[in-house]
Image (cartoon, helix red, strand yellow):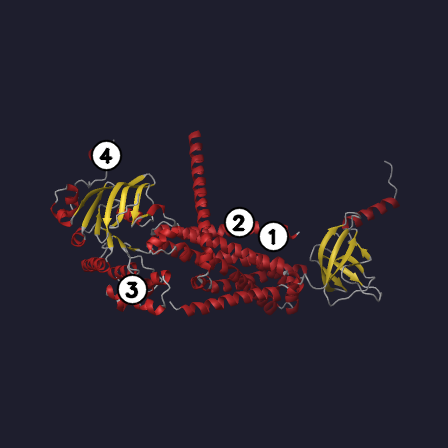
Amino acid sequence: MASSDPSVMIDLNGVRFSYADRPILQGIDLTIKKGEIVAIMGGSGGGKTTLLGLMAGRLKPSSGSVTLDGFDVPHLGKKDLYALRRRIGMLFQFGALFTDLTVFDNVAFPYREQTDLPEAMIQALVLMKLEAVGLRGAHRLMPSELSGGMARRVALARAVALDPALMLYDEPFTGLDPISVGIIGRLIKRLNRALGMTSIIVTHDLNETLRLADRVIVLSGGKVHRDMAPDEIRETEDPFIRQFADGLPDGPVPFHYPAEDYLTELMGS
Amino acid sequence: MNRSRFDIAVGFFVALGLLAMVFMALKVGNLASFDNGTGYALEAHFDNIGGLKVRAPVKSAGVVVGRVESVGLDQDTYEAVVRLRIYPNFRFSKDTIGSILTSGLLGEQYVGLEPGGDPVYLGNGDRLGKTQSAMILEKLISQFLFSKAAETPAKVP
Amino acid sequence: MTGRMAAILESLGHLLTGRLDRLGLAARFAGALVLVLWMSIRRTSLIIRELYFSGVRSLSIIAVSGLFVGMVLAVQGYEVLQRYGSTESLGVIVALSLVRELGPVVTALLFAGRASSAVTAEIGLMRATEQLAAMDMMAVDPLSRVIAPRFLAAIVSMPLLAAIFSVAGIIGAWIIGVQLIGIDDGAFWSQMQASVDVRIDVLDGLLKSIVFGTAVGLISVFEGYFAAPTAEGIASATTRTVVISSLSVLMLDLVLTVMMFRGLS
């Protein structure tokens, strides 16, 4: 069942997942090759973040298989899973920096926990990573002293500390000003090319995504709705994607929450 | 942040806590009475020990000279067997009398030792030759009542 | 009428099964925690950090409370003892109440309010801001890196703080009884020493506070770890930590006291 193709990073096959009785994913088939930048888009609560959780082994699918670099993720023991995760980096929605550690110590965390490198070497590595995101000068600050965009960049430096083969980005642009969005987008692309890693970006920021991604996957109703190149998205006539791209209030995704007839409710029964 | 600051503060805290424990052991409690192993054992048989408890004091002339180590029952004679642990610096003659006394009217019960004049001293594991049991209030009262009853024959109604 | 009874019974049953579910969750959580415990014991620097936040930061409130409780006990005790003309027993009464009961119990209650609530809020916040998830993604087990050191710190802090509380209380009683009222200094201490047994009273008191530390520590990390990741969720988890810790301490105290007195006779 594990795909033997060495060029494949992730292979999802018929993945279903539900929280309690609420189905989130209803049969996802998806293959992502090594070195790709893939954006996953879809409405809020559409299971995008759940998909990342499944790939990283934080969640287990109710059925279907998740294969990451040849490993059967849902059936790995804790030890093997942690060994696999050393090669995965994840950027969380709001950075998830450790609030009780300085910027420096945050980026040093993976080295101190996962390696036996001497402190002098760690210091050099941390400053290098911080330099890459342009925040070497801020290494003494606490996370509470950083702006949202800076915190996201520090978190990015921390996520790529161990040079992962796969980077997962959970809503990396949410809540940032346009300049920070541009900076983060550029960094994602640069890190991807420089380190030759695979990147999966969950987002609903369409503009930045189209500039960044090699492939865009649109989720709808717990399934892969479309899988296409960025250029195709701009031209497609697909009503769901048009609604999404143009920010139309009503369309395949209804404006109104399901309700009984307006007039009937107003007049009373 | 500063690791050595944590270390110093925590070191101070742990030292203070341990100091408090030592204070409780030595100044509040008396660790000297905790020496179960030292000293020597004596054995005394009583008809009745009343309310004597393990770890009750053993006193001679009012001075604490040991503790009650264990209380048991001799299955043949149905006597109470009390083992006493006497502190090593006290010696008692062979004809010492052991008795169970009460401090005050309702106080705790203890074992009193009254030495005689024998030049030979009691050694480890020796048994006290003479003992006097605890005074049981109910027995005293019933004795008193019975003797009263004997003096004045009951009237026939 | 019967419908209403049924509804009441149903909601009662619902409440009970909810509680039992939570108890089962706590038991599984405790089991998982025990499995990683020995691994985190070796990370002394992490435990020292938590000892600082739980223990050192609680030091002043514990010492001052102990002092005042001891003083109050001395005033109250003196009032009663002088009726029987045995005021020199004040030391005994104060020391026994502190060492056996008030030291461990009041310390645990204060600890729940001061340190454990903060631990719950901290862990809850770390969860809400995905710090625990980030750690997990960096292949570092939050259970052994974050949870276990806080749990261990509670177990270690509690007996130390309880001892400090008791000693502060005895000193407070000494200030009132000997310095202000004028009870004989020698009688105060010697009576105390004659009646307080190291094994029965002092060690039992310390044993109690270790049990309390385990219970309060477990409750605080459990409530934090499973707090709903919202502001209200963390606030109510913090409240639950204080309420459940206090009730557990008082309940455990009864059980332990009965067990200890039974073992005595």
Q: Is there a contact, CB below 8 Å, between mark 1 and mark 3?
A: no
Query: Please, what is the three-letter code of the amino acid marked with disc 1?
Result: Met
Q: Compared to C12, does A90 lie above or below?
A: below
Measured in 3D between alpha carbons, the distance from the residue under mark 1 to the one under mark 4, in whole angstroms, is: 66 Å
- Earlier residue among tags 4 and 3: 3
Return the residue at label 1.
Answer: C260
Return the residue at label 4.
Answer: A260
**If the image is split into quadrants, where does the C terminus of chain A sit?**
top left
Return the residue at label 3.
Answer: A145
Measured in 3D between alpha carbons, the distance from the residue under mark 1 to the one under mark 2, in whole angstroms, is: 14 Å
The reply to whether label 2 and label 4 mark residues of one chain is no
Measured in 3D between alpha carbons, the distance from the residue under mark 3 to the one under mark 2, in whole angstroms, is: 45 Å
Q: Position of residue A54 (x, y in %)?
A: 31, 47
The reply to whether label 4 and label 3 mark residues of one chain is yes
- Earlier residue among tags 1 and 2: 2
Return the residue at label 2.
Answer: C251
Task: Say which of marks 4 and 3 sits in front.
Answer: 3
The subunit letter for the residue under badge 3 reads A
Measured in 3D between alpha carbons, the distance from the residue under mark 4 to the one under mark 3, in whole angstroms, is: 49 Å
Task: Say which of marks 3 and 2 sits in front.
Answer: 3
Q: State the image quarter where residue A121 is shown.
A: bottom left
Q: Compared to C13, does B54 lie above or below?
A: below
Q: Position of residue C144 (x, y in %)?
A: 42, 56
Query: Please, what is the three-letter code of the amino acid marked with disc 2?
Result: Met
Q: Position of residue A17 (x, y in %)?
A: 31, 42
